Image (spheres, helix red, strand yellow):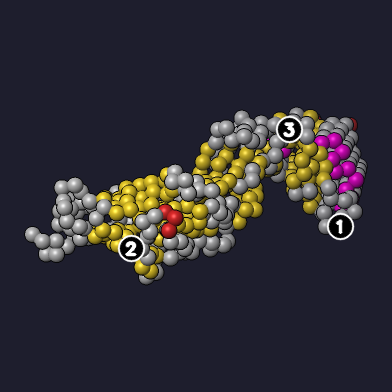
């Protein structure tokens, strides 16, 4: 059977940059024949398709220049030949001007007509700005003596690439770190995605990243939230890695062409005894465990005593410091002394101790709510809060009220306590605390 009676085309796609079905679409090819001698090789331009015809056992050369710009450079080949039995093959090599082979691959036909598995290479290991040569060796099977022509379509691609920029750290509502970065440029021309095919965000307990965990993020994303915090560590380090891949739909392989790592960001180290400010409130760390069991004391505020807008103070059960949650276990001595603009105070359920003189001299305060966990109200805690008329104590574990704790508050103040603790608490609020006969101690 003659070659012309049966036609068999085998297309080999050596470079397909594809994502979500988006493929590289090459323009119409320009005919260019390679030279038989390396020194005569014609120059290939980037982003231009070239068509050449190879016959028999033949070697041809092309010349190209490695770009100095940062990005991914790669050759794409597309070959077809007419044959009913012959098995032509091509060896493709990248050489320097000393004929040293830098990269190589083989393209061959199969008698069964199956498309050969992808083989190829990128140009990222080449020295920027230097000239190199593409050597193509066309070989026929030794069992056939007639000439088989192969049409070769080749293209030299360059895809610009940037490292992740403007990496920053924030925290979500659960107190977990959120890593964000700039990803607004549609930088690649081969698809509708942004600057990268995908991102890796790496986290480590070591600034050297000797051991780290990687999170894969889609190329269109610009943030990732972490849940792998190590509770034994008081500091975590993060960096963002931009990745470009070759995606081959034939054998489902992903080959990394280029990776660029960003600068490192980290959580702050939280130390026992140190003071941190969150939402204008100052907290001293009394137990620096980072697993949610750590504790702090509220020591005061950055707000000025003359601030007319600072009328209501609500002390929560917990506070987030650099993304980690700590229980507010105490209010420090003299923490809010003489804040005369305050009118109401609410104390969280984890506060066990209300410190000495913590609210003394807050002459504008009219109401106070004490949380369920309070065990001690220390001396002069609410001393001279002249307008304080309503005190609500939700705690069933209160064990002591210090001397002068409610001295000089409103003479007709009403203190409400849990019904089961009324008799016991009546004993706690003796005359030494400032309690007067004109005051009332009622059930909640």
SS under mark 2: strand
Residue in the picture at 37% in, 65% down: 32
Camera-nearest residue between 398 and 87: 87
Q: Is residue 296 magenta?
A: no
Circle 3 or circle 2, nearest the eye: 2
The residue that label 3 is drawn on is 271
- Residue 169: x and y, percent? 65, 48
The reply to whether discs 3 and 2 touch (Cβ–Cβ < 8 Å) is no
Q: Secondary structure at mark 3?
A: loop
Q: Quadrant of residue 263?
A: top right
Residue 214 left/right relative to 341: left
Q: Looking at this view, is 336 or 99 the one in front?
A: 99
Horizontal side, residue 156 vs residue 263: left or right: left
Can you say which quadrant of the picture contains the C terminus?
top right
Q: Which residue is mark 2?
A: 52
Q: Residue furthest bottom?
A: 28
**Residue shown at 47% from the left, 48% from the top:** 96
Q: Gap between marks 2 and 1, in whole Å?
A: 83 Å
Relative side of 261 to 122, left or right: right
What secondary structure prevails in the magenta region? loop
Quickly name the residue at label 1: 308
């Amino acid at each position: 059977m003659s070659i012309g009676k049966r036609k068999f085309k085998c297309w080999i796609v050596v470079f397909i940059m594809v994502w979500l079905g988006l493929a590289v679409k090459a323009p119409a090819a320009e005919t260019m024949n390679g030279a038989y001698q390396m020194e005569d090789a014609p120059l290939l331009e980037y982003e231009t398709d070239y068509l050449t015809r190879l016959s028999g056992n033949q070697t041809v050369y092309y010349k190209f220049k490695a770009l100095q710009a940062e990005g991914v450079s790669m050759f794409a080949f597309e070959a077809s030949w007419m044959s009913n039995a012959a098995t032509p093959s091509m060896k493709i090599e990248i050489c320097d001007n000393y004929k040293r082979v830098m990269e190589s691959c083989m393209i061959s036909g199969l008698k069964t007509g199956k498309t050969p598995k992808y083989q190829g290479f990128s140009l990222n290991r080449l020295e920027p700005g230097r000239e190199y040569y593409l050597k193509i060796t066309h070989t026929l099977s030794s069992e056939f003596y007639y000439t088989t022509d192969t049409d070769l379509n080749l293209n030299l691609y360059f895809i610009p690439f940037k490292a992740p920029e403007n990496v920053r750290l924030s925290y979500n509502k659960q107190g977990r770190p959120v890593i964000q970065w700039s990803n607004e440029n549609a930088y690649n021309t081969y698809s509708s995605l942004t600057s990268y095919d995908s991102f890796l965000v790496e986290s480590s307990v070591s600034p050297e990243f000797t051991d780290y965990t990687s999170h894969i993020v889609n190329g269109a994303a610009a943030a990732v939230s972490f849940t792998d915090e190590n509770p034994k560590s008081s500091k975590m380090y993060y960096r963002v890695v931009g990745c470009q891949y070759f995606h081959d739909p034939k054998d489902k392989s992903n080959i990394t062409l280029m990776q660029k790592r960003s600068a490192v960001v980290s959580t702050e180290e939280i130390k026992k005894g140190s003071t941190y400010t969150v939402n204008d409130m100052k907290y001293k760390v009394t137990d620096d465990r980072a697993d949610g069991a750590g504790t702090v004391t509220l020591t005061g505020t950055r707000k000025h005593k003359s601030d007319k807008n600072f009328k209501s103070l609500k002390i929560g059960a917990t506070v987030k410091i650099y993304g980690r949650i700590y229980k507010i276990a105490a209010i420090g001595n003299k923490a809010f002394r003489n804040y005369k603009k305050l009118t109401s105070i609410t104390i969280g359920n984890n506060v066990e101790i209300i410190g000495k003189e913590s609210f003394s001299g807050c002459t504008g305060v009219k109401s106070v709510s004490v949380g369920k966990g309070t065990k001690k109200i220390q001396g002069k805690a609410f001393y001279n809060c002249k307008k304080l008329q309503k005190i609500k104590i939700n705690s069933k574990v209160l064990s002591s009220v210090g001397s002068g704790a409610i001295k000089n508050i409103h003479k007709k103040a009403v203190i409400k306590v849990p019904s089961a603790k009324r008799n016991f608490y009546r004993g706690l609020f003796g005359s030494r605390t400032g309690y007067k006969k004109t005051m009332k101690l009622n059930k909640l």
